[in-house]
Amino acid sequence: MITVEVGDDDRIASVQFAGGCSGNTQGVASLVRGMHIDEAIERLEGIDCHGKGTSCPDQLAQALKTLG
């Protein structure tokens, strides 16, 4: 599960992941804070983790797509 807060300007205010690698998810959440939704999707979509076909960053991109 991913909880995302977005401001009126379509910029990411905060992200919280439930699960995943804690260090990586905290890092991704910190890096996208203040970023426009479209830019975050562009940067994160398609990132793969160990051949799983997705990753925590990719799942964040998919979640952000539902907001746009």
Image: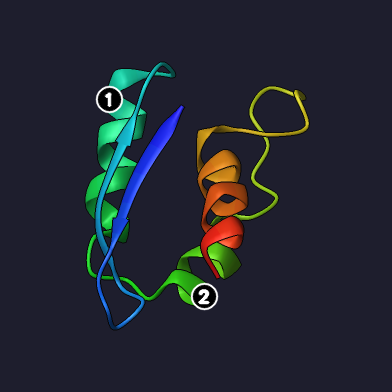
Disc 1 residue type? Gly
Left or right: residue 61 versus residue 30 is right
User: Can you give x and y, in whole percent of width and height, for residue 14 in the image?
Assistant: 23, 51
Left or right: residue 4 versus residue 52 is left
Left or right: residue 68 versus residue 35 is right
User: Can you give x and y, in whole percent of width and height, for residue 51 in the image?
Assistant: 77, 25
Picture mark count = 2
Q: Extreme bottom residue here?
A: 9
Q: Circle 2 sits in a helix, a strand or a loop, which is it?
A: helix
Q: Is residue 20 above or below residue 16?
A: above
User: Can you give x and y, in whole percent of width and height, for residue 11 in the image?
Assistant: 31, 73
**Residue depicted at 55% across the width and 64% down the height:** 41
Instruction: In this rendered view, identify the residue nearer to me: 11 or 21.
Output: 11
Residue that label 2 marks: 38
Mark with earlier residue (1, 2): 1
Left or right: residue 29 versus residue 60 is left
User: Can you give x and y, in whole percent of width and height, for residue 68 in the image?
Assistant: 55, 70
Instruction: In this rendered view, identify the residue nearer to me: 60 or 67.
Output: 67
Q: CA distance from mark 1 to mark 2?
A: 24 Å
Disc 2 residue type? Asp
**Residue depicted at 64% across the width and 28% down the height:** 49
Q: Is residue 41 above or below residue 19?
A: below
Q: State how the image is colored.
A: rainbow
Residue that label 1 marks: 23
Q: Which corner quadrant of the image does residue 31 belong to?
A: bottom left
Q: Is residue 65 above or below residue 50?
A: below
